[in-house]
Image (tube, rainbow, N blue to C red):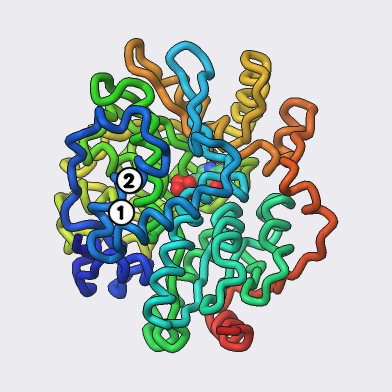
């Protein structure tokens, strides 16, 4: 399988190279040249998550890993999950299901991809003897998942930039308490978008990039999108695919998780509609309703992992909606530097054919946490509540709706307590989190400062 950049001016790579690289050298994002079709979807019924994952991933990873390597990586990636189904589907209401993606070690869906690429990186690096520096930007959950996946590995340093004061205490402690010397938590003075911008600048500085062996594990990394395709397939098959259509609602920030659903759809999974659910940072909802993709300022919310105004993976959806016209994408991304762009009529139609959208206020989010608690006894996290709120507006009879439950409520105890007066408890494996010492470095929102810090702290 060959991977091409959405901006058309970076080298074509194989899976391993695309995964190790993260961001393409022309600033674009890698996509497979062609998406394989799953013509035996019915045969997925009853498969273990791991076996389903192997069948889905294999055509995308091609010759980069042997069958044994890939199987081993998948097995180890999900062995630490707290549920045998890995991504269990539970029922919320008639016709409405929750896909629970919070049974991994850091309690958010990010573990699905990060645990897997952690294993795949290890195999690739052991083979080549290469040393790398992972730098990631996080709105909260990617950072902890990346640290959990890469801590203690011999030829890897992992630097995580998070917006100072804008992640929950549980999220922060998950990043600052691992004692491993190769883990570096950096609190940046700014928003998540600043973290993401600094990261892109580091990658676009090719001398620096090459000198430290920069590798990116943000949701722009194709390997992450790929791993997330699996649960769309297993959920759809559980609900009757290929014989029945399914809708999905996805609480979205960077458009990574929902874009994986779009690839599942291209692979032949009968997904009728993918519904984008945003909080008050609603650039995606505005773009899909008005055709105008324009950044505003980030308004911190109780669903902080979606407090984003520049939605990186949307570039992939645009590339497909523009029929693979890399020149058009380069132009749009140029316009974005000065605030935004208009999506062409044809591309907007293509997007609306598969995506619907909705926006949820802070009050509505809290109200939905309460409603679900009253209706089902279940306690959901604020991101999931955003999803459930939008899903309820899009449910149609005869088509099951699946809302992705992206995190465990215990990651956001303050918001949940505000909503229902109860503080959700951390699961036993994290019970000691509040007693451990923290290690964190405060950094300014400045490239040079960041580069010297990375050079100074690197152990690999
Ligand atoms: C990252 C995250 C999201 C948003 O996912 P994207 O792939 O960025 O759209 C939603 N909810 C939670 C809990 C997250 O950690």
Q: Which residue is mark 1?
A: 341
For the point 69% across and 56% down, the residue is: 174
Q: Position of residue 357 (x, y in %)?
A: 39, 32
For the point 80% across and 52% down, the residue is: 432
Q: Which mark is residue 292?
A: 2
- Residue 378 lies, with reference to residue 37, above or below; the image says above
> Badge 1: how crowded within 10 Å, few (<14), some, or many (20+)?
some
- Between 20 and 309, the one lying in front of the other is 20
- Residue 458 lies, with reference to residue 223, above or below; the image says below
Q: Is mark 1 within 8 Å of ligand 1?
A: no
Q: Position of residue 235 (x, y in %)?
A: 39, 30
Q: Position of residue 22 (x, y in %)?
A: 38, 67
Q: Is residue 217 visible?
A: yes
> Badge 2: how crowded within 10 Å, few (<14), some, or many (20+)?
some
Labels 1 & 2 near each other (Cβ < 8 A): yes
The quarter in which the N terminus is drawn is bottom left
Q: Which mark is first along the chain, 2 or 1?
A: 2
Instruction: Determine the secondary structure under disc 2.
Output: strand
Q: Which mark is residue 124?
A: none
For the point 36% across and 15% down, the residue is: 396
Q: Is residue 285 visible?
A: no
- The residue at the far front in this view is 68
In three-dimensional space, the C-alpha distance between marks 1 and 2, rounded to whole angstroms, equals 6 Å
């Amino acid at each position: 399988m060959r991977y091409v950049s959405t901006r058309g001016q970076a080298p074509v790579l194989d899976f391993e190279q695309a995964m190790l690289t993260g961001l393409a050298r022309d600033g674009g994002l890698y996509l497979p040249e062609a998406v394989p079709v799953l013509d035996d979807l019915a045969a997925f019924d009853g498969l273990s998550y791991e076996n389903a994952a192997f069948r889905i991933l294999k055509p995308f990873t091609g010759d980069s890993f042997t069958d044994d390597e890939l199987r081993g990586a998948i097995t180890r990636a999900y062995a630490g999950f707290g549920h045998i189904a890995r991504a269990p589907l539970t029922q919320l209401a008639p016709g409405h299901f929750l896909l629970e993606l919070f049974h991994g070690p850091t309690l958010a869906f990010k573990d699905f991809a990060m645990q897997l690429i952690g294993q795949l990186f290890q195999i690739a690096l052991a083979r080549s003897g290469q040393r790398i520096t992972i730098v990631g930007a996080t709105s909260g959950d990617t950072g902890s998942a990346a640290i959990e996946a890469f801590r203690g590995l011999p030829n890897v340093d992992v630097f995580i930039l998070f917006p100072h004061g804008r992640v929950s205490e549980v999220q922060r402690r998950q990043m600052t308490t691992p004692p491993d010397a190769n883990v570096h938590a950096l609190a940046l003075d700014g928003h998540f978008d600043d973290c993401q911008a600094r990261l892109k600048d580091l990658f676009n500085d090719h001398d620096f990039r090459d000198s430290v062996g920069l590798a990116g594990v943000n949701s722009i990394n194709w390997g992450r999108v790929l791993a997330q395709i699996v649960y769309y397939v297993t959920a759809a098959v559980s609900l009757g695919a290929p014989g029945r259509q399914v809708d999905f609602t996805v609480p979205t920030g960077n458009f990574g998780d929902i874009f994986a659903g779009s690839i599942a759809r291209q692979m032949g999974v009968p997904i009728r509609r993918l519904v984008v659910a945003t909080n008050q940072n609603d650039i995606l909802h505005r773009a899909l309703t008005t055709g105008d993709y324009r950044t505003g300022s980030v308004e911190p919310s109780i669903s902080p992992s979606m407090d984003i105004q520049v939605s990186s993976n949307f570039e992939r959806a645009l590339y497909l909606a523009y029929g693979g016209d890399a020149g058009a994408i380069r132009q749009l991304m140029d316009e974005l530097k000065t605030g935004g762009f208009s999506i062409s009529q044809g591309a907007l139609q293509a997007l609306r054919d598969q995506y619907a959208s909705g926006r949820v206020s802070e009050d509505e989010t809290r109200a939905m946490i309460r409603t679900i608690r009253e209706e089902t006894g279940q306690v959901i996290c604020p991101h999931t509540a955003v999803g459930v709120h939008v899903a309820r507006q899009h449910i149609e009879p005869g088509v099951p709706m699946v809302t992705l439950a992206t995190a465990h409520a215990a990651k956001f105890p303050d918001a949940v307590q505000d909503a229902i007066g109860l503080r959700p408890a951390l699961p036993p494996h994290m019970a000691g989190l509040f007693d451990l010492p923290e290690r964190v470095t405060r950094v300014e929102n400045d490239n040079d400062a960041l580069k010297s810090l990375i050079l100074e702290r690197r152990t690999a």
